[in-house]
Image: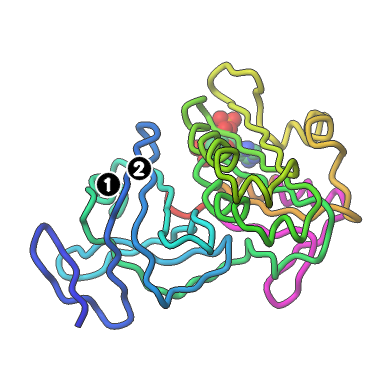
Amino acid sequence: MQMAHEAGASVALPKGMEALTVGEIRHWTGRTFSFRTNRPASFRFRSGEFVMIGLMVEGKPLLRAYSIASPNWEDALEFYSIKVPDGPLTSRLQHIRPGDTVVMRPKPVGTLVHDALLPGRRLILFATGTGIAPFASIIRDPETYEKFDRVILTHTCRELAELDYGKHLMAQIAADELMREFVGDKLTHICTTTREPSERMGRMTDWIRDGRFAAAAGGPLDPETDRVMICGSMAMLLDHKALCEAAGLVEGSNSAPGQFVIEKAFVD
Ligand code: A2P
């Protein structure tokens, strides 16, 4: 029987759950943090998928859906989380330390995957807040660059510091010889803030409407060439979905691939 730790004591792990050991933890802002864990040898996933992870609380697993932010070739798993002050899980999870146990139900699922999109030339990833997590996996996956000539990642947050996780990812890709080779010059990162002055300001939905997105990305949304993935709050998803549909793109799924796919950034 696998064991997990709860408040320093060993507790039995329910059937079908994996215990993960927490490694590096980084607090990016007062509202977000990321952490890494070991990856069980038998655990496979497609870039962009999510799993249920959490903590043992009073002998029971308290789980939430989390996108896997690490690429599927990496030995470790990475998660990027919001801190909700009175959130049942994140109010506890934000205090984890290296060596602590996080539990996972190892059944990855989701629609932000290559299989749910038809072939295309430009892949556009629209994210707000912690909605960047599944794209952190996708932009580090060589398959992305085998399938697309250009990859545009947009990330909109309230404040500048909330863009740091994405900026760090870009720096990590640029510093890694292997990733630099398969990414080449295909990846463009467009980040904006909405509540703190910065070089680029405004919601990406407004950028799409007024032509700033087309100028920065090298052309407006085009159903012939573009495939789109969207991840953020429910309001953000609905607004981006409407803009994709207005441009003539059709929503896809795992069973019927299309031109755009959406998924809610989960924990809030
Ligand atoms: P804004 O500051 O104008 O609300 P949140 O933390 O609330 O999820 O927001 C993350 C980012 O997403 C913020 O910059 C926010 O802008 C933006 N945002 C919120 N709702 C939408 C929407 N419906 N469409 C596009 N961007 C949105």
In percent of width and height, residue 218 lies at 85, 36
Q: Which mark is residue 91?
A: 1
Q: Quadrant of residue 101?
A: bottom left
> Label 1 CB, ligand 1: below 8 Å?
no
CB under 8 Å between discs 1 and 2: yes
Quick check: 178 left or right of 213? left
Quick check: 75 left or right of 116? left
Q: At 44% across and 74% down in the image, what residue appears?
A: 43
Q: Which residues, given as a range, are shown in magenta?
A: 240-264
Circle 2 residue? 83
Disc 2 element: loop
Q: Is residue 159 above or below residue 114?
A: above
Q: At 71% across and 43% down in the image, what residue appears?
A: 187
Q: Amino acid at mark 1?
A: Ser
Specify the quadrant that holds the N terminus: bottom left
How far apart are the two marked residues, 1 and 2, measured between alpha carbons? 6 Å
Quick check: 162 left or right of 212? left
Q: At 72% across and 44% down in the image, what residue appears?
A: 184
Instruction: Compare residues 86 and 161 and report the one nearer the observer.
Output: 161
